[in-house]
Amino acid sequence: MIRVGLRALGAAAALGVAAAGCSLQDPLPNPQTEADEALDVELAWSGRPVGSLESGAFALQPAYADGVLYVADARGWVRALDAETRQPVWHDRLERPLSAGPVVAGDRLLVGDRKGRIYAYERESGEPVWMTGLSAQVLASPRYTRGVVVARSADGRVYGLDAEDGSRQWIFDRSVPALTLRRNSAPAVSGGTAVVGLQNGRLAALNVADGSVRWEHTLTEPRGRTELERMADIAADPVIHRGAAYAVAYQGAIGAVRIANGAQHWSREVGSHRGLVAHDEEVYLAADDGRVWAFDRRNGATAWRQEALEGLTLTRPVVHEGYLVMGDDAGHVNWLRLRDGELVARERLSDVPVERPPVVTGSGDVYVMDARGRMTALRPR
């Protein structure tokens, strides 16, 4: 199997590091943005709770639950921080490189490593609970629903693990094309269903109780004369929203599929390996070319398209208080207004890429982590 590194897919630029305790505004790249419409964003805190996250192919990104931030790095550190005080709650060091997580799974916290092992901690105390080995490295974060951890390995297998003891309940297996992105999408879970985006451009809906296939749907057909042209990985995490699964394929299309039966609702020819988010009546997509799209979730019609960030590699968007927030490979965090896509703030936080999506806490702070593990708390005013 040949894999292509994602860093070769996007542009990179090096910009300066922001100083803590001030409001940082770069000149907005969109000349149509009026100064009195710009969003003022305060840099509330900056620190480095963990080390390097390494390549964006690894699914290491912060998680938040019940007032606590959870972070992990490529060297094996796992830490829990109070989201208000940023003081440590607990920490642990695994003597092996991590590649996925942390993920909140009920009263457990999950991380995965490059040897294909999933580790579970007691979320409140940090006590190790169990470890389970999969058949290949873990490049996607596990997901949790109804007492089952749904985890992927890089060889095309999906596992259902008992959340209490990590025992295997079932395995779903599909072949992997000869050439794929070095990135897997995390399953989307809702109730008793897990929707998995595969490397061949197909979606599979699994019953989490036993791993049986409820339906499969071809989001995009691989096309082209070469293996490179035919790459159609669903490498961005699918999402489930109001009875539909939304997914996007690299070099392919974004589409909506009904959860009940796998029937296609709509499809548009826009590709991405970074991600999308569904909110209210719209689906927001960070495309591979740096454009940001808003689609009507009911019929796929374009609500707006923002081109000010074209040429950048963006993170998966996150919705926060009327804005769409995403990092980019030039070390910025970008704020777009939901109603019209206007770029209203652009903060320079790092001289290295921001490859992980922001995390919003219960207090309204937006936490962003760069590739070196530096975390910054932003607060819109």
Image (cartoon, rainbow, N blue to C red):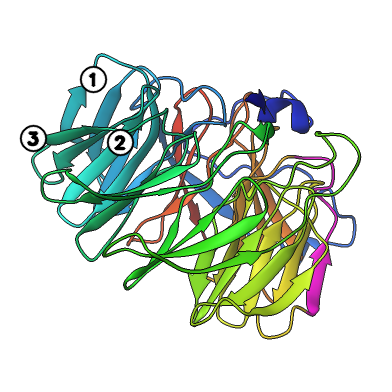
In depth, the one of 182 and 26 nearer the eye is: 182
Dot 3 lies on which element? loop
Q: Position of residue 258 (x, y in %)?
A: 56, 80
The disc placed on residue 94 is: 1
Separation of residues labelled 1 and 3 (CA atoms) = 12 Å
Q: Is residue 286 left or right of residue 236?
A: right
Q: Is residue 101 magenta?
A: no
Q: Position of residue 120 (x, y in %)?
A: 19, 39
In depth, the one of 333 and 216 nearer the eye is: 216
Of callouts 2 and 1, the N-terminal one: 1
User: From what the image shows, is residue 45 above or below residue 219?
Assistant: above
| Residue interval drawn in magenta | 301-312
Label 3 CA crowd tier, 10 Å (few <14, some 14–19, many 20+): some
In depth, the one of 200 and 378 nearer the eye is: 200
Separation of residues labelled 2 and 3 (CA atoms) = 13 Å
Q: Is residue 303 magenta?
A: yes
Q: Residue 7 falls in which quadrant of the image?
A: top right
Residue found at x 60% / y 56%? 317
Residue 83 appears in the picture as rendered: no
Amino acid tagged 2? Val
Q: Which residue is mark 3?
A: 127
The disc placed on residue 111 is: 2
